[in-house]
Structures are given as C-alpha cells and as structure tokens.
Image (cartoon, rainbow, N blue to C red):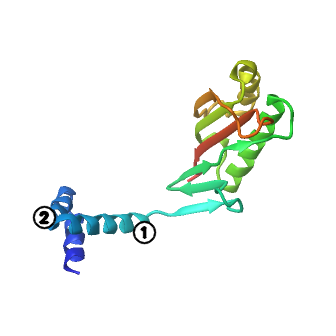
Amino acid sequence: AVFLETYCSLSQTPNIGKSAMFARNLGRVGSSLLATVQKTSNQRFSSITRIGVDDPRMSKIVVHNGTVYLTGLIDATLPDVEGQTKVVLAQVDDLLSQAGTSKSNLLTASIWLKDIDRDFKAFNSIWCDWVDQENKPVRATVQSPMATPSILVEIQVTAATDE
C-alpha cells in the first residue's frame, strides 16, 4: 500500500523520472511492481474494440485510440488481379463502415501482389479509381508469395475514426 501511494503521488508530478528513481531505489521487486502498476494504469485508460471475431486466429477490425486497424483482406474467387482488387476494396469499404469510418480517413495501406511485374499496373488502375484523391494514405506495395496459389492481392489498411 505504501508503494502504491508513493508511486501514485510521484507519477502525478510533471517529473516522470521521480517514479523511475523510486523504483530503482526499491530494487528489482520495486521495478517489477512499478511496471505492473504502469501496465494496469495504461490499460485502464485505453479501450480496444474488436469486431468480426469469429475467426479463431484474428479479428477483422480492431479500434483503439481513434485508429481503425483492418486485417489483411483477400479474394480467391476471381481469376485476375482486377477482379480480386475490386472485391477486396469493397471489403475494405464494408469493414471501415462497420468501424464507423471510411476510405476518406485512411492513414496507411499495405499491399501485397503475387506477381508485381505482371499486376502492378492493373492494380494501380483499380486503386486510383477507388481511393479518395483528396485523402490518399501512405502506401507500400510489395511482391510476396501468397497463402494459396489463387490469391493474387492482399490489402491491409489503417484509418482514423470519424471523431
């Protein structure tokens, strides 16, 4: 109790170094307690919302501190990158809508193409028609082997909420 009262009073001061100094003075046990208190304190002040949690491996959407994170999205039903890209971008629109935001609030886009030499131009054509030209995200596109042979493109985005 004395440790927590002292930690709380020190952590309220503008000099954050005081709490670290206090933990150092208490040794390994004090540092461990301080880390536990800080972790608990940080968790208490942040909220995480998970949407689309039916898949045992991942959530489709995670919202934290005004940022929306989408899982990597694919389509393996169509035989070409243009068709798959259109389907994936429709999924992006749908998931962003479920999270209360839109492509106008995109922050980042990560794109994986199975064959960048063959598909980059076609992908860009679809992307440029879809993306909000007034609010383009930062973007990275790389070539990558995919989980199955029929997947030609995977897209993962982050966006700000409409706050």
Look at label 2 and name its amino acid.
Asn
Q: Can you tell which mark lies on residue 25?
A: 2
In the image, residue 113 lies at what x, y percent? 69, 29
Would residue 12 be seen by someone viewing this image from the given angle?
Answer: no
Look at label 1 and name its amino acid.
Arg
Q: Residues within 10 Å of mark 1 (few under 14, many from 20)?
A: few
Total marks drawn?
2
Q: Which residue is mark 1?
A: 44
Looking at the rendering, which quadrant does residue 92 occupy?
top right
**Extreme residue toward the left, this view:** 25
Which residue is nearer to you in this view: 52 or 30?
A: 30
Which residue is nearer to you in this view: 67 or 162?
A: 67
In the image, residue 154 lies at what x, y percent? 70, 37
Q: Secondary structure at mark 2?
A: helix
**Extreme residue toward the bottom, this view:** 1
Q: Residues within 10 Å of mark 2 (few under 14, many from 20)?
A: few
